[in-house]
Amino acid sequence: MTDATQSDTAFRPKPSLPPPANTVGVVGWLRKNLFGGPIDTILTLLGVYLLYLIVQFAVEYGIINAVWTADTYRECLDINLGEGACWAGIGAWFNSMMYGRYPDEEQWRVNLGGIILLLWLIPFWLPKVTGKIQVGMSAVLTFPFLAASMFIGGDTGIFLHVMASIALTLFVAVWLHVAACYVLGRSLPELLISITGFTDKDDRLHKYVLLGAFAVGFVIALIYHMSWDLVEVQTTIWGGLFLTLVISGIGIASALPNGILLALGRRSKMPVIRVFCTSFIELFRSVPLITILFMAVTMMPLFLPVEFNPPKLAMVIVAVCIFAAAYMAETVRGGLQAVNKGQYEAAQSMGLSFWKMMALIVMPQALKLMIPNIVGSFMGLMKDTTLVSIIGLYDILLMGKAAGQNPSWLGFHTEPLLFTASIFFVLCFAMSKYSQHLERTIGGGYGRR
Amino acid sequence: MSAVDKAVPRRDARSISEIVNDERFRSIFYQIIVAVAVIWTAQYLITNTAENLQARGMSTGFEFLSSTAGFSIAWSIIDYEAGDTYFHVYLVGIANTLIVSFFAIIATTLLGFVVGVMRLSSNFVVAQIASAYVEVMRNVPLLLHILFWFTLSSALPSPKQSLGWLDSFFLNNRGLYVPAPVPGDGFDIVIIMVLIGIAVAYGVTVWATKRQMATGQRFPAFWTGVGLVVGLPLLAFFALGAPLTFDYPALKGFNFQGGADVPRAFCALLFALVLYHTVFMAEAVRAGILSVSHGQTEASYSLGLKPSWTLRLVVIPQAMRAVVPPMISNWMNVVKNSSLAIAIGYPDLVAVFMQTSLNQSGHAIEIVAMVMLFYMTVSLTISAALNYYNKLVQIKER
């Protein structure tokens, strides 16, 4: 009885009315985002008109009036009267803008080097692969030597032979490791240990197995590398996008380790080290890159012994590395400051040494927080690499300029710039999107709500 | 007593491992190693440099600064003639760098605020246009922007067909021509009036703030200040009979005479710097506004503040805390990046001093040091000001 009355009189909400027709769906979206009021409407119309003008110009210049086949710039102008782009010139100069004056029949070396680097980095994106940090470190630390011995060629000297062979060994090991992870579900070290029957032995003996396997691989790689017979290609004729990527690649790879060391030095309690790191960072951060480059090419020859005459490229790379390290140091320092003091204290109270505290507790958090800034400075470095054209290295920008000074392409200036701009846009845009993706997947969890 | 004495380990009895593991010992040891390494490297470099200079028969020292430079400079904001000294070249370079940076900074800041607010607009088209602008501009190197606009500006009409505006501004493929102000007698009094106006306005603001703190009564200090700073000089200007005339540029023969001219390279550089750096300013503004949580606005409304007061007293002061540091480092980057002028032949400090003067005189070390000194002075001054501001507005924490 009581139950029935209660359920009869209980508050029973009516189903909600549907929202007004003009606030949902396409109409609602339009009203909210485009035509919210008179000013909004005017802005929208102006914006659409502006877009129309830009698109119209781009289509006319880049497609309708563009010339796709011609042998000289004059031919292009005769066809379209300068009303459209001359993409034919890009076709004619494409190879130069990619490789500079690197000999045509040797360009496979550059391509192969690029492919090896890509293959080396692919395991990063494979979810089942373990030990990604080791994979990355092996690539960053040894690939430059392999690349140097491939790109320069000739008689490389014993040091490059050894380093390149180590790189080859590690590269093969990384892909064996990937195969082991996917086929057998175990890492390469585990596999080697179980094959040789060391599983039951003392843990300390395991590293001998790995060292032995590495030594065998190294000897094979060294013999193989010694058998290489590559024509020498002087660095002075390197150029184009290849040169841009070499300089920025080395700068990027060296920036993070050097930057971390400098940042730690700046926060150190030891006054000598702190003063040294602080003045290094402040000096190179407060001057423009172009002055550092000028310093490198005019002053570095004076600093070095008389008989020692390094190529310009080497001096430029040193300058770029110094510059990149100083900037990265400040980024890393920002991350270190953002890590809660309690984390340092907790790590110390667990009895971790300074380096263990940094490597296991602080750095992972600091670097995660700083992903957008770190990628931002990588992008900045890549863009800044174009400055080497000012001191006369034939990077992609100067190669494009050279195209416009060639007798049969005289005046061909705008298109190489547009082409270069689009290459940088693609590279940098991809980097920033990837950084946003990283931020979403691994950057969260700490310091965010 | 003797038992206690025994229990305390004596200092000189420490084993080697104790010393090696002592933090103080290690710290001193590492510092000595670093100091020795730095000193040794410096000494090595200095010895090499001395040997190199001797081998090449080059002299060192700053005496060359007082010798004649002997080359001409395409355009300078301060007077320069081919017979002037290298030190004068240095000053010309600094002035040219500062003038282009100054205009670039002002335009960047204003445009950056507009684009930043546009990106947050509720209007879809406006927001998307602003985002597209940001993405396109920031993913292309600045040097490319500069070269691109410089190349495009060569397609401007010749002086005879100049683009004119009001018959006093002309743009052609040589540069921009604007009327030059010519101060007459007594114009300095107007300038003095501006300074007096600023001083009095500052005094009024301080007084008004004090009175409001003490009594709660408000005083329209801002508008009084504007009246003082603008009104006083205007009064003086007209009382003295408008002592300012303009020298208008006019086409004579193949080029413009009179007025003030800025070269094409200046225009292209300024345009590219503004386009590129506006992006970073806009991002700073956007991040700053987003950093103020909506709760602050709501709290302010619930206290009964009008929307305009909420914006002025609650939102903007908090947003500024996040906007100002990146804004100032952006300004610093403008000054540094103006050095790319060298690529298009605008005679800035790096172009006239680090390139032309260095090639002519061969004093690499002195010249590089002087150029670096200038840039370091600018950056360190700006960052000192920034640190002071940060201390001022910091939220006090543990």
Image (tube, rainbow, N blue to C red):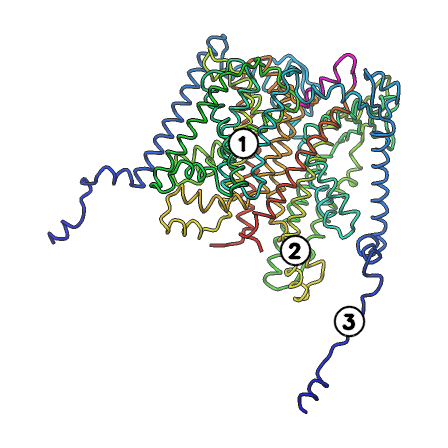
Mark 1 or mark 3, earlier in chain? 3
Q: Residues within 10 Å of mark 1 (few under 14, many from 20)?
A: some
* Quarter of the figure with residue A90: top right
Front one among A154 and A213:
A213
> Which chain is home to disc 2?
B
Could you tell me which secondary element the residue under label 3 belongs to? loop
Q: Would you say residue B88 is visible in this rendering?
A: no
The CA span between labels 2 and 1 is 41 Å
Of marks 3 and 2, the one in the foreground? 3
Three-letter amino acid code at disc 2?
Answer: Val
> Could you tell me residue B327's position as x and y percent?
63, 42
Residue denoted by label 1: A253
> Is residue A207 positioned above or below B161 on the image?
below
Disc 1 marks a residue whose amino acid type is Ala
Tag 1 subunit: A
Q: Which residue is mark 3?
A: A16
Same subunit, labels 2 and 1: the answer reads no
Q: Is residue B220 above or below residue A112?
A: below
Q: Is residue B214 above or below residue A442?
A: below
Q: Which residues are magenta?
A: A396-411
Task: Please state if B329 lies on the left or on the right of A274 as rendered.
Answer: right
